[in-house]
Image (spheres, rainbow, N blue to C red):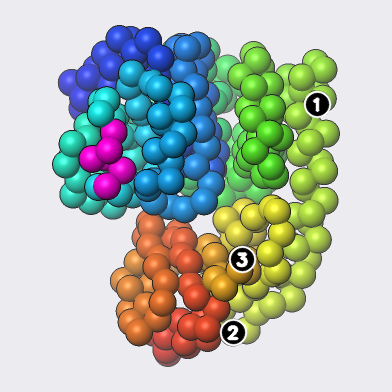
Amino acid sequence: MINQKKLKEIMDYIEKAENPLVLFDDDPDGLCSYLLLKKIKDQAKGVVIKSSPVLDIPYLKKVEELNPDILFVFDKPLISQDFIDNIHIPIIWLDHHPIVERKGVHYYNPRFEDSKDNSPASYWVYKVINNPDLMWIAAVGSIADWHIPEFLDKFKELYPNLIGNQKSPETILFESRFGELIRIFSFLLKGGTSDIRKNIAVLLKLKDPYELLDQKTSKGKFLYNRYLRVKKQYDILLEQAKEQFDDKIILFIYPSSKTSFTSDLSNELLYRNPDKLIIVGREKGDEIKLSIRSKKLILPPMIEKALVNVKGYGGGHDHACGGNIAKDDFKAFIDNLKNQLK
């Protein structure tokens, strides 16, 4: 957990910021973390980080351009020390991935107090701002990251018929209307930078989830139609992926395109095949970007072993990891993983 003293520290930084910048991960947890802060601090500007799990030197230019007085980083597993050393304003880093050692940053992570607590960034931003009107946004970010928040019952009272009797993250994600809302948030982060920026600007104007799910307003209709266009691409890939499996593994690699669905595909394939190791990759240049999922296997140590003599990197949570592997070494990486399943 993150204790009340630490949560108040974060809120103090938010309140005193005059021109804050938020850098956030390109998934619903990262997006919702930004939306929650922006809702109470309209001066905040947000930049989605799409290129890498590491926040590194290339983003210095964007920070210099926007000239913030405080930098918030949400849901990014790694910030390079070089990046930190070149930032001369307070950096507030709120994350829930495995802890790393860094200097010169205000680092908040529930794992400091409980190594097994990986409750998502959006959950903690909601705890910081403590605004019940924004509970639905926090619920999107939390459940998207397979975390059931303790306020779920209260959420069901406020927004009936969205979740029903579902109690687990996977059944909410794939067997409820709220699961569609989560997917909409995810798909609105797909595409070009200008489209994503427009989607986020419209999302910020929504008052409740029904406005989007039921397309009650022009804003809701606009976003829902954008979602449907992306969903067509996703559905084609999902049908192809369903055919790629053996006794223990589903391995699906698809060609590079402007849209990455590796995380979304791997989550749905795991739900449909809970007994299998799921590996979904997208070719990009000389590399293959991966999402790896398993219901039972503890993935980080397996990936670490599979990376021996392999050019690439990977890691993440116990049952959900990402990676980036050189094409020339990809077969060796997969063979190394398969050997650990025997």
Q: Is residue 132 visible?
A: no
Left or right: residue 335 compared with residue 109: right
Image coordinates of residue 208 in percent, x first then y, are: 64, 17
Q: Dot 3 lies on which element?
A: strand
Q: Dot 2 lies on which element?
A: loop
Q: How would you rate the neighbour count of disc 3 (Cα within 10 Å): few for under 14, some for 14-19, many for 20 or more?
A: some
Compared to residue 28, the image places residue 250 above or below, namely: below
Q: Main secondary structure of the magenta part?
A: helix
What residue lies at 69% left-to-right and 69% top-to-bottom? Answer: 254
In the rendered image, which residue does mark 2 sit on?
247
Q: Nearer the viewer, residue 244 or 192?
A: 192
Residue 16 quadrant = top left
Q: Quadrant of the N terminus?
A: top left
The three-letter amino acid code for the residue at tag 1 is: Phe
The magenta region covers 82-87
What residue lies at 25% left-to-right and 47% top-to-bottom? Answer: 81
Image coordinates of residue 253 in percent, x first then y, are: 65, 72
The three-letter amino acid code for the residue at tag 3 is: Lys
Residue 237 quadrant = bottom right
Q: Of circles 1 and 3, which is in front?
A: 3
Q: In the image, which disc is placed on residue 284?
A: 3
Q: How would you rate the neighbour count of disc 2 (Cα within 10 Å): few for under 14, some for 14-19, many for 20 or more?
A: few
In the rendered image, which residue does mark 1 sit on?
222
How far apart marks 2 and 3 lie (CA) works out to 28 Å
What residue lies at 57% left-to-right and 56% top-to-bottom? Answer: 263
Q: Is residue 303 visible?
A: yes
How far apart marks 1 and 3 lie (CA) works out to 30 Å
Residue 257: within the magenta? Answer: no
Whichever of callouts 2 and 3 sits on the residue coming sooner in the sequence is 2
Residue 342 quadrant = bottom left
